[in-house]
């Protein structure tokens, strides 16, 4: 097929390859744009939750509104016997632990895990650091968190952990598997101004759409490059127009 001084000679295999690649690259680009929109919506939703009024947990309170980043308040008694020390946590470039203590909610048998903050590693670098836990009824306020296991874990998890436990990470499911009472499906990150805690600094990750926008541009660019390469391979100048 001739267009002025140029010939367009499409061949079956390169044409099919172009259609496949361009379709794939465009699909990936639009998928990344959808992910970017999801991240924007998620960031707005999490910000809204953080600004909503505090929920007071009690035996009658519905848990339907208790979602990640929502502020909550609960009364109960700490149970340090089954405390968890989450290792590998840093504060101001110092190694230490996050101390997670179960709290038996007032008027109920259910426990909620409270992350009371950071403590430094013991001086010998091996022993668990000595900490104090209040006795009797306390009131705790904080922000809801739902911890997840890392993508890659090393070693098997013990079904019967030793207490107090020293773990590289925490999930509610992991804790609940080692106790004989019900556990709330979330963890409370204790507020910095609240009593009975340690060093507490809870930076809230903010979902960003920037990465997905960048990936979308990259995939659209690949589609354009594939088209340019295809045209370069299938279009040539007519011999009569080439300077002798």
Image: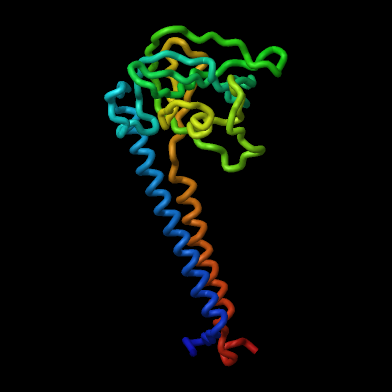
Front-most of residues 30 and 62: 62
Front-most of residues 203 and 102: 102
Percent coordinates x, y for residue 86 in the rendering: 58, 25
| Marker count (numbered) | 0
Res 90 visible: no
Percent coordinates x, y for residue 190 in the rendering: 44, 19
Residue drawn at x 52%, y 85% as measured from the top left: 8
Left or right: 51 as drawn, with respect to 29: left
Residue drawn at x 47%, y 56% as measured from the top left: 216
Q: Is residue 17 above or below residue 94?
A: below
Q: Is residue 239 above or below residue 154?
A: below
Residue drawn at x 49%, y 89% as measured from the top left: 2
- Residue farthest front in this picture: 180
Percent coordinates x, y for residue 30 in the rendering: 42, 59
Left or right: 140 as drawn, with respect to 85: left
Res 97 visible: yes
């Amino acid at each position: 097929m001739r267009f002025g001084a140029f010939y367009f000679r499409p061949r079956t295999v390169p044409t099919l390859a172009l259609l496949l690649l361009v379709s794939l690259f465009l699909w990936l680009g639009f998928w990344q744009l959808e992910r970017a929109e999801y991240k924007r919506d998620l960031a707005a939703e999490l910000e809204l939750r953080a600004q909503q009024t505090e929920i007071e947990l009690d035996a009658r309170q519905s848990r339907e509104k208790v979602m990640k980043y929502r502020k909550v308040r609960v009364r109960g008694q700490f149970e340090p016997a089954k405390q968890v020390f989450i290792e590998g946590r840093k504060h101001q470039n110092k190694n230490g632990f996050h101390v997670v203590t179960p709290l038996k909610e007032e008027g109920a048998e259910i426990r909620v895990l409270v992350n009371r903050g950071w403590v430094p590693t013991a001086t010998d670098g091996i022993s668990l650091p000595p900490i104090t836990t209040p006795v009797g009824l306390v009131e705790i306020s904080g922000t809801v968190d739902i911890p997840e296991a890392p993508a890659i874990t090393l070693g098997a998890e013990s079904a019967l952990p030793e207490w107090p436990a020293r773990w590289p990470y925490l999930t509610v499911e992991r804790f609940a598997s080692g106790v004989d009472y019900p556990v709330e499906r979330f963890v409370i990150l204790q507020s910095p101004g609240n009593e009975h805690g340690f060093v507490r600094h809870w930076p809230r990750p903010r979902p960003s759409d920037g990465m997905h926008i960048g990936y979308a541009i990259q995939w659209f660019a690949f589609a354009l490059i594939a088209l340019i390469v295809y045209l370069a391979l299938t279009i040539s100048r007519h011999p009569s127009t080439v300077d002798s």
